[in-house]
Amino acid sequence: MKAVKKLQSYFFDYRFEILGIILTWILFGGTLISATIFHEILLPISIFILMGVSIVMVKNKRKTTRLVFITFAVLMLTISLLSIFREKQSGLAIISLIIFLVFFTLLSFEVFRQMLQETTVTHNIIIAAFDCYLLLGIMGATLFTIILYFNPNAYSNIETSTHVFDKMLYFSFITLTSIGYGDISPLTPLAEKLTAFFGLIGHFYSVVVVGIIVGKYVSS
C-alpha cells in the first residue's frame, strides 16, 4: 500500500511533464510509425494512459471531481476497446468524439486551475501552460472532426476516407497559432464562425498566460 501511495505521489509531482509527453505523442505519434497501427492500437493505449494521468491529477480534490474523471475514464476505455475489437461505425465515432471533447475540456480547466494555484514561476507553471495549449489544439481538432461527421463538405481539401482527425489536428493548431496557410478552409457558416472563434481563443490564451506568468514573477 505504501509503495502504491509513493508511486502515486511521484506521478502527481511530475503530472504536468507526463501529461505533456502523452499529448505530444498523440499529436506526432502518427507521423513516426504506421498511421494504421497508431490509430487502431497505440492511440487507444495512449488515451488509456491519459485517463490514468487525469485521475492522478485530481487525487487531492473532492470526491465529486474524482468521480467525474473516473466516469469519463471508464467511458473512454470502453470506447477505445470497442474501436479496437469491432468495426468503427459513424454513430459510435460521433459519441466518442463528444465524450472526448467534454473530457479534454474538463482536463484543460483542471490543468489551468492548478497552474493558477502556483505561487511562483517554476517549471511547473511553464509546462502546465504548454499542456493547456496542446489541450486547446486537441479540443479544436475534436470539435472540427465532429462538424465533418455531420457535414463532410464543411472544410475544403479533406478526404473523409483518410484519417480525418490528423488533418483536423493540423488545421486546429494552424488556426490556434493564426498561421493560416489556406490549404484547409471552412466552407459553411458554422465552420467559419467556429474557426474564427477558435483563432480568437488562441490569441486570448497567449495574452492571459503571459500576464499570469509575468504577474507571478513580479509578485515573487
Image: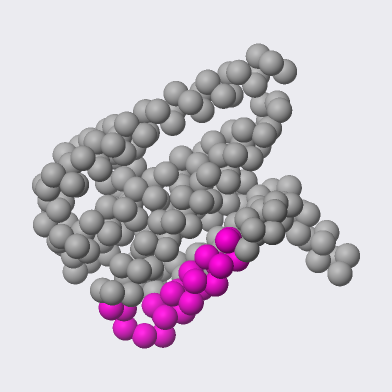
44 with respect to 14 (left or right): left
Q: Identify the image's colour scheme: rainbow, by chain, secondary structure or one colour.
A: one colour
Q: Is residue 201 above or below residue 188?
A: above
Quadrant (top left/top right/bottom left/bottom right) for the N terminus? bottom right
Q: Is residue 184 visible?
A: no
Extreme-top residue of the structure: 218
Please tell me in which quadrant of the rendered image residue 68 appears.
Answer: bottom right
Q: Is residue 72 magenta?
A: yes
- Total tally of numbered discs in the picture: 0
Image point 53% across, 44% down: which residue? 109
157 with respect to 101 (left or right): left
Quadrant (top left/top right/bottom left/bottom right) for the C terminus? top right
Extreme-front residue of the structure: 64
Image point 46% across, 50% down: which residue? 105
Please name the predominant secondary structure of the magenta segment in the image: helix
61 with respect to 154 (left or right): right
Q: Give the magenta part as a residue range.
A: 68-89
Extreme-bottom residue of the structure: 86
Q: Is residue 29 above or below residue 36?
A: above
Q: Is residue 178 visible?
A: yes
x and y, in percent, of residue 29 in the image? 43, 59
Image point 44% across, 23% down: which residue? 207
179 with respect to 201 (left or right): left
x and y, in percent, of residue 30 in the image? 38, 61
Please tell me in which quadrant of the rendered image residue 35 appears.
Answer: bottom left
x and y, in percent, of residue 183 in the image? 16, 44
Q: Nearer the viewer, residue 43 or 149?
A: 149
Image point 34% across, 48% down: which residue? 140
Q: Is residue 33 magenta?
A: no
x and y, in percent, of residue 206 in the image? 44, 28
